[in-house]
Amino acid sequence: MIKHVIFDFDGTIADSKYLTAGIINDLAEKYNFQKIKKEEQEYFRSLSILERIKAIQLPVYLIPLIAAEVNIRYRKSVNTVPLVSGIDKAIQDLRVSGLKLSIMSSNSITNINALFKKENIVAFDNIYTSANIFGKDMGINLFLNRNRLKNDQVIYIGDECRDIVACKKNNVKVIAVAWGYDSKERLAKEKPDYIVSSPSEITGIINSLM
């Protein structure tokens, strides 16, 4: 029986993929790598993180620096970041049903809290963050141990293939959302437990598992 829901943040709750692309393009001029053209943005959703890095010719050694600068610039623009339409209602409905809710993200706590303050969202029990974009499976394992939860008591909601892979490593059910950073077709290849096209579908799935 599901007791706790973990949400990813960017692409799942925050509709931030275009802001992020804009920041990366600004940094491309500073650090001399390729920009993401507007007409390429949808194509980039079909690529893995490593394929995106290769496509823009971003040196691997620059990734930590770029990630840090993205977080700083994101904070300056957080008031322009919209929520995914309908996600606030889905979050509130899950909270009302008695479930505990947490965030697991590679974004910073400062950025996440700033957006939640702007949108008056107070539903989450915990926010866990990590700068390691490839280590979410370890984060989920730590979360389970820290909260003394069994694998079948947790469900994860995310928008990227790495979320699905991390959940499978921990035998945790995952709902993939089709509106985020990775395309629906790319998500389907990783065979998540569920794929949804609107936030209203999330509550129906989770209610059926309670």
Image (cartoon, rainbow, N blue to C red):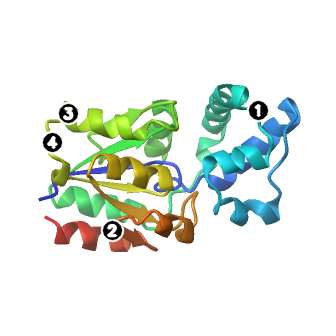
Report which residue position mark 2 lands on: 202
In terms of sequence position, does the residue under pointer 3 or pointer 2 come before the other?
3
Report which residue position mark 1 lands on: 59
Nearest to viewer (mark 1 / mark 4): 1
Q: Position of residue 180 (x, y in %)?
A: 54, 60
Q: How far apart, in angstroms, are the residues tagged by discs 3 and 1? A: 36 Å
Report which residue position mark 3 lands on: 145
Secondary structure of the residue carrying tag 3 is helix
Q: How far apart, in angstroms, are the residues tagged by discs 3 and 2? A: 25 Å
Which mark is drawn over residue 149? Answer: 4
| Left or right of residue 57: residue 124 | left
Residue at (85, 44) in percent of width and height? 34
Secondary structure of the residue carrying tag 2 is helix
Secondary structure of the residue carrying tag 1 is loop
| Left or right of residue 102: residue 98 | left
Q: How far apart, in angstroms, are the residues tagged by discs 2 and 1? A: 38 Å
Mark 4: amino acid: Leu
Quarter placement of the N terminus: bottom left
Mark 2: amino acid: Ile
